[in-house]
Image: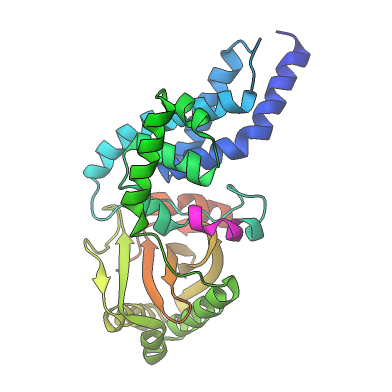
Amino acid sequence: MSDNTTSDHLDTFRRLRPRMQGIAYRMLASSAEAEEVVQDAWLRWHESAHDGLDSAEAWLVTITTRLAIDRLRSAKVQREHYVGTWLPEPLMSDALAPSPEQMLERADDVSVAFLTLLERLSPEARAAYLMREVFDADYGEVAEALGKSESACRQIVHRAKLQLQDERPRHVVPHEARLRLLRGFAEAAGSGQFTALNALLAEDAQLIGDGGGKVPSFGVPLVGNRRIAQLFYATHRRFGDAVRYEVVVLNGQWGLLRFIGNTLESAQSFETDGERILTLHVQRNPDKLARIATALGRDTGPVANR
C-alpha cells in the first residue's frame, strides 16, 4: 500500500470517526468502551483491502455497529451484577457534536434518560433502533450491519419503538427555561435554601443514583420533593462553602457538576416539565466521573457524603 493510499484511508477514517464514536457511545453509554470499539474498527479498516469498496462510510458504520453489539452483549452480563443502579457515563464535551449548541439540538437522542431507557433493548434491537431512528440509516444499511433481512430489521425497529414509546420524555422544554430552572436549583442547593429546593421539585420527583459500589448511593430511587430537598440541604449543612455547583452541558442537556473542595463528587442530569424538576440522575461512581474530572483538572474519588 502506497503512502498516498495510506494517507487517504487515514483521512477517510478521521472524517467518519465522529459518526462512529456517536454510534458506539449511544450503543454502550460508555465513552471509554466506545473509543475501544472505534480503535478496533480502525485496526480492521487499516488491515483490510479497499479495492472495489462502494462506500467507506457504510463499511465503517457496519463494522462499528457489529463490534458495539458484541461488546454490549458482554457488558449486559456485567451490568446484571452491577452494585446498585447502573447509569450511563456522562459526557461533558463536544465528543458527539462540534459545539454545545449542536449538542443541545440533539439532546433527545443522547440524554442520560434516553440512554438509560435504551438498556431495555437487546443489543441488536438497540443497534437497529439507533441506526434507523437516530442516524437515519435506510433499512438496507441496517440489514447489512445486523446481517439480517430488511423485513426482519423493520420488525425489530417496530418492536423497539413500541417498547420505548411509553417511556420517552413527553415534555419539550425550551433550553432557556431548562437553564433558568437549573441555575435556580444550583443557587438554592449551594446556599442551603430548603424551601426553594422543595418548590423547584415536583411532588413526586425521584432521584436515581449510581455509586457503582465505590461510594454510597441509593439502591432504589429516592422519591418525593421533600426527601430530595432534605438530601441537598444536608449536603450543604455538612460541607458548607466547600460545596459548589457548576452548570454545564451534560449529554446534550443542561446539567450540574457538584464539587466538594477540589473533588468532583457527582454529575447530575435532570428531566423537567419546564416548571419543576421531575427526575434527577446522579452519577457518583468515580470511575465514570474520571474523564470529566481529568478534563477539568480536578480530583475524583470517595467523598464522605451520600
The verdict on residue 57 being magenta is: no
Residue range corresponding to the magenta coloring? 103-110
Image point (64%, 56%), residue name: 102
Image point (44%, 54%), residue name: 289
On screen, residue 299 above or below 22: below
Q: Quadrant of the N terminus?
A: top right
Residue 194 position in % (x across, y down): 37, 88
Residue 12 position in % (x across, y down): 69, 27
Question: Please, which residue is most extreme toward the right here?
Answer: 4
Q: In terms of depth relative to the viewer, which is nearer, 30 or 116?
A: 116
Residue 192 location, quadrant: bottom left
Residue 146 location, quadrant: top left
Q: In terms of depth relative to the viewer, which is nearer, 174 or 265?
A: 174
Q: Is residue 110 visible?
A: no
Q: Is residue 57 visible?
A: yes
Q: In terms of depth relative to the viewer, which is nearer, 252 or 154?
A: 154
Question: Please, which residue is most extreme toward the top here?
Answer: 1
